[in-house]
Image: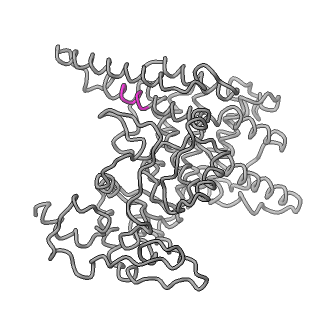
Amino acid sequence: MRLEAVLTQVAPQLNLANLPAESITLPPQQLPQQQQVPPPQTFPSTGMPGQYPTAPTYVNGTATHNGTNGIPGPLPPRTGLPSTQGSNGPRPRIDRGDTSDEFVAEQMGTLALDDHGHLRWIGGSSTMSLIEAFRNFSSSEDRDAPSPPSTNGATPTPNPPSANLLYFPSSLRFGKVRALPGPEEVEYPPWDLAEKLIDAYFEKFHHTMPVLDSISFRKKYQRLMDARRQAEEKGETPVFGSSKSDAGFVSVVFAVYAVAARFVDDERLKTDEEGEVEETGGMGMVYYERAMILYYIGATATQLAHVQSFVLLSSFLASLNCLPQAWLLCGQAVRIAQDLGLHRTPRHLLMSHLNKETRRKVWWCVYGLDRMLAGALGRPLGTEDSDCDVELPLPIDDVDLPTHFQTVMEMGASPSLRDLPEPSIELSNKSLMAGFNALTELYVIVGKVLRTVYAVDAVELCKEAVERTQAQVASLDKELTDWCERLPATFKSDPKSPQQISLGALLLRSHHAPP
């Protein structure tokens, strides 16, 4: 059967309400009467045009409410962030005037819940995406019925999506072999040393690899430490940090300890438990191994913490010049990140702005680390630019993000909208996140170099091939020059803080380093 005939049969079953008219045309008889979009109503509490928000259909992580997404019209693109040009480069942001292109890109897969409640990515080529579409359609009658308004006048809250048990069967349970210890059995550093490690991490390392949100992490870390103290006083098991579901976060904690160990001058860190000297990694290696064990304890429930942990552990190994092993761990981070859909834009996901920014930061940390290690080792890249459409993070540091979001909400922006106003240029150029975004743009160019100049299938000795390679090198050299000229003065010639100095040194060193 021809593809056109298949689409003609399948299209009426899918939600096409958001598709611009110029992007697809169906004969009127192909769209059943019951699927016609009803005239817009008004939310009783907000006055916004649209229908009552019913239980959403999740496609690409987008919660669609009868084709309206709960907002009036398409989302405007976020502006103000530099975008990388070139046919071989990624699309760090969605910045298109053509909403039909954006719609088509967003239909190339879906985010579905597993039985642990975590979002997992199913690509567009998977038959499961089609099954998910039919599954959503089969329950559309229930969703299409308007929800009654709340008794207190508030807008009804959409029901969360159900788990996709076809793709993530709940009957499949790992952990049958009882060989690993429980999370509560892990040995932490002494209290004072643990605080030194956490402070050193955020002071010396975090600005170069912002894979964590500092405020959210510190709050959760304090909760973990409080639970430990209370458990020690009562002689009980801690209420937090002892279950397998907590093991992912505790793994991140020990990964932070491992990374920070080289920044803290303390005799207790210079030798490990066997008395080995610092050259072998000292206690940093002990924390690394504990973090790995904690990952395996909680590996049955894939989560964002696993990506964060592997990014930090890969960075730790790279600091010890164990680049091949670091490359392997980074590869695991890439796979888990893609499994969670971090490579796709979160702009339509029903989550807080802060969580969306964290997803962006984690993805671009994975992306940059992958390119750094691939370039250093001359090995293949783990990420394809053409598979990624997630935006760069806002050029705002962690401590300023809550204030920025609160200010935007007070200005009257809808909490449903993804695209918020950009910070001022002055604030952006001085933020450490602006330096991280600049580093990410540099890694984009590094990826182009590895894909073109060093590609195996690009090795040709004929005159035309040599001339083509020379033209590509000249183009890439110009991109590097333009990148350096765009670099804010804060990181080139006028740093004001130790973090700006170290990040500026990293930027310029990476600019001049091979390949």
In the image, is residue 356 part of the stretch drawn in magenta?
A: no
Q: Picture coordinates of residue 194 (x, y %)?
A: 78, 42
Quarter of the figure with residue 109:
bottom left
State the predominant SS element of the stretch in magenta: helix
Is 421 on the left-hand or right-hand side of 41? right
Q: Quadrant of residue 272?
A: top right
Residue 322 found in image quarter: top right
Quarter of the image that includes the N terminus: bottom left
Expressed as whole percent of the image width and height from the top left, the position of residue 84 reads: 39, 34
Give me the residue at 59% from left, 35% from top: 426
| Residue found at x 45% / y 59% | 348
Horizontal relation, residue 440 to residue 246: left or right? left
Q: Nearer the viewer, residue 221 or 432?
A: 432
Quarter the C terminus occupies:
top left
Queried whether the magenta region covers residue 448, the answer comes back as yes
Q: Tell me the residue at 32%/21% (across/down).
A: 475
Is 310 placed above or below 129 here? Answer: above
From the viewer's perspective, is residue 503 above or below residue 7? above
Question: Who is closer to the viewer here, 265 or 296?
Answer: 265
Q: Magenta span covers which residues? A: 444-450
Task: Please state the horizontal and vertical placement of residue 508, each as a whole percent of the image.
Answer: 54, 20
Q: In the orientation shown, which residue stands out farthest toward the right? A: 233
Location of residue 150 in the rendering, given as x and y in whole percent from the top left corner: 56, 83
